Image (cartoon, grey):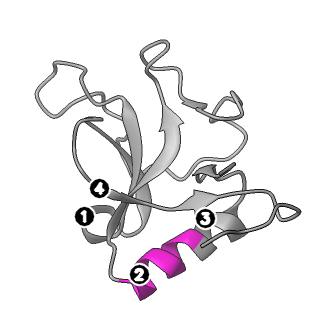
Amino acid sequence: MGAYIVEIFDQPTNDFIVEMATKHAHHVIWLGGSDLVKSGEWIWSRSGVPVNQFDDWAPNQPDGSSDSTDTEDCMELNIDKYGGHWNDDQCEHRQRFICEKPADEEIIG
């Protein structure tokens, strides 16, 4: 109903998402970014904005893959392994996510 996987454009939003994920014991969550269109060019999926205005990648991330097959095309926020920083991971992995929607729209449910 008009919601989409969260896109992060600044440090306060990133901190809020880390806090929410930690509070609810969801230590790995999907974010709304990927490099599925062109490998190595990370964009926010809904807005199409390049992930270069703000990012919080963990050291040496994104790395494309742990086995050099370049299959890690989706973005996660990983509290356990990377202390709340971002990592690239295989899109097929099942993980929790946080959705957002414009504040002026009604929330149902």
Q: Where is mark 1, residue-wise?
A: 81
Bin the neighbour count of mark 4 within 10 Å (Cα to Cα): few under 14, some 14-19, many 20 and up.
Answer: few
Query: Horizontal and vertical percent for residue 7?
Result: 63, 49
Query: Horizontal and vertical percent for residue 15?
Result: 60, 73
Q: Where is mark 4, residue-wise?
A: 95
Q: Where is mark 2, residue-wise?
A: 22
Q: Are marks 1 and 2 in contact (CB under 8 Å)?
A: no
Which structural element holds mark 1?
A: helix
Q: Which residues are magenta?
A: 17-24
Q: Are marks 3 and 1 in contact (CB under 8 Å)?
A: no
Nearest the eye: 81 or 109: 109
Q: Looking at the image, is mark 2 or mark 4 nearer the viewer?
A: 4
* Kind of residue indicated by mark 2: Thr
Residue 46's place in the image compared with 99, above or below, is above
Please give the label number shown on residue 14.
Answer: 3
Residue 69 magenta-highlighted = no
Residue 16's place in the image compared with 72, above or below, is below
